[in-house]
Image: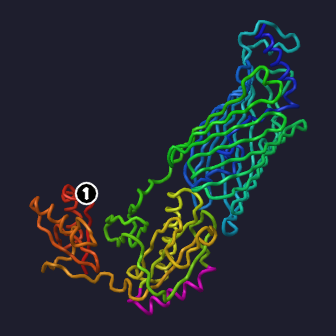
Amino acid sequence: MKNNILLILGAVLISNWGATQQLAETNLYEFNKFKINPAYAGESGCAKINIGHLGQWSGYHGAPQVSYVNGSMEIGKNMSLGGKVMLDRLGTLTQVNAQGIYAYKLNFGNAHNLRLGIGAGINQHAFDLSGSTIQVEVDPSLNTERIKGVSFYSEFGFVYTLKNFQLSFSIPNIMETSSSLSPTTSGGLTNRRHMIGYMGYRFGKLNKVSITPSVLYKNGSAGQHQFEGNLLLNVKNRLQLGVGYRHEAGILGRFGFNVNDQIQVAYAYEFAMTDLAKVSSGSHEILIALRMCNKVPKTPIDIVPTIDTVYVNAEPVIETLTDTLVIEKLVKEEMVELEHTIYYAQSQSSFDEKKEKEALSKVVDYLKENPTKSIYIKGYASEEGSDYLNFKLSGNRAKNVYRYLLSQGVSRSQMISIVQGEVSEHHGSDVKNNDSENRRVTIILKAGEIEEQTEQTQTSNDALPFHAIAGSFLAEKNANTFANKLKAKGHTITYIRVKNRILVSLMSFSTRAEAQAELKNLKQVAPDIWVYEQK
């Protein structure tokens, strides 16, 4: 009897498909906005994959079951690619949707941008009538076990962001298409156009405590309208708690937890407020999000192999890097003779060269006229987003300015780029809690601070210029302790003094190639060994 009812339902769905079209439901769009709008592709700045499942009206036979996988990644300065696959089951009806996504971002200023996204793919609808025991005289094709049809699918969306405000709009099935079923039936399939709108504003900072009220609007065929109001609390970008109200449907509860920078899990439950509550226990949705970024730098400080770059962190920890000056705390401040600041839009690392040309030309001319002078190029980011992404972003900002000045003829020896990451109290021009002011690169010229960067004395008469450095220390006591351990193993130690630092050298070489060739063997003695050139 149950199968007969499902068969009749299938016949009704087929004959009336031209008037109705289900838009797959989702309760975790606050955690996976890409699912409702293709323009969100690549928004996180990392490659991201979302895997989820929604079970509606638990306990009700034939209720909708939606499984999905979607993912996206940046492929260029402002471009992103993505894809979506969804399987939606409702009784005898199964819908499969697969599509590719392209998105592009337009920047208008600080934290002001517009993202555009398009998607194209296929929709396949199938009615599984296996196990049914009645015959349908009006359409003999329904007596077959499986009927299906395939049609073209397309969607379009945009996301407008202004600081903490976000407005998005998308149109699934923007090009309404139809397909006939196979075997031929008396009905056809028509994919109806839908509309989804979202608006939200975040109060507070993601890495502290923030709260985001938002509204979602969905418009379907046959004059169907649905409104949702939501409130999402975020604690230190680790824990998320949310509540929502779906008009004439139910109340939503949401929970999210970032296991680490790569993995997030989320869960949503809908308490039905309609007659469905009498026959079901509500709807459940679970989501696992995987984010794949470049290797995260260790805290409190880790060195990325970029020549002429200083990585700064508040904790006094020393790391070493070939041909790179590394300092252990903050750059010592002296009287600023020249300073210029370049401001950036949110998440951007490039700057307007035409706009900054006049100011940077003055820096270039000054450095060419004063070859003994040097500058710091300090890259900053605001507190928005994760620590890693801000670290990476501030580094890219500093590197781009470095490369520009290098292309204008400034000597490498006159520039050191400094990756500051999120703003803390580094320099007098820093503005705490002002995101638009903190997305910047500051070029600072200091009197006599790094003019004689390579000035040094060596405790031995060794004239060989390249040295295998096993350790770098501020305090002579610490240098002696470290050197004594190496001496106890039979190694000959040489001290090289560079300003206020003491470098512990294991061996000296006449060429860099010789030094690099020997490093592999020396790493067994000191894993962090590096080559230093004495000039």
Left/right of residue 193 with respect to residue 77 in the rendered view: right
Rendered image quadrant of residue 196: top right
In the displayed image of the protein, which residue is found farthest to the bottom?
369
Judge whether residue 359 is colored magenta: yes
Relative to 280, does residue 48 appear above or below in the rendering? below
Q: Relative to 230, is 16 above or below? A: above
At horizontal 72% and vertical 24% (from top left) the residue drawn is 281
The amino acid type found where label 1 is placed reads Pro
User: Looking at the image, which residue is at 42% across and 84% down?
Assistant: 374
Whether residue 295 is situated above or below residue 180 in the rendered picture: below
- Considering the whole magenta stretch, tell me its main secondary structure: helix
Q: Identify which residue is drawn at 46% across, 85% down.
A: 445
The residue nearer to you, when weighing 530 against 421, is 421
- In this rendering, position of residue 290 left or right of residue 317: right
Q: Position of residue 159 (x, y in %)?
A: 72, 55
Q: Which residue is mark 1?
A: 527
Query: Taking 506 as reference, is 151 left or right?
Result: right
Q: Position of residue 218 (x, y in %)?
A: 81, 42
Residue 507, compared with residue 60, is above or below; it is: below
Residue 45 x/y as whole percent: 57, 55
> Which residues lie in the magenta part?
354-373
Which element is circle 1 on?
A: loop
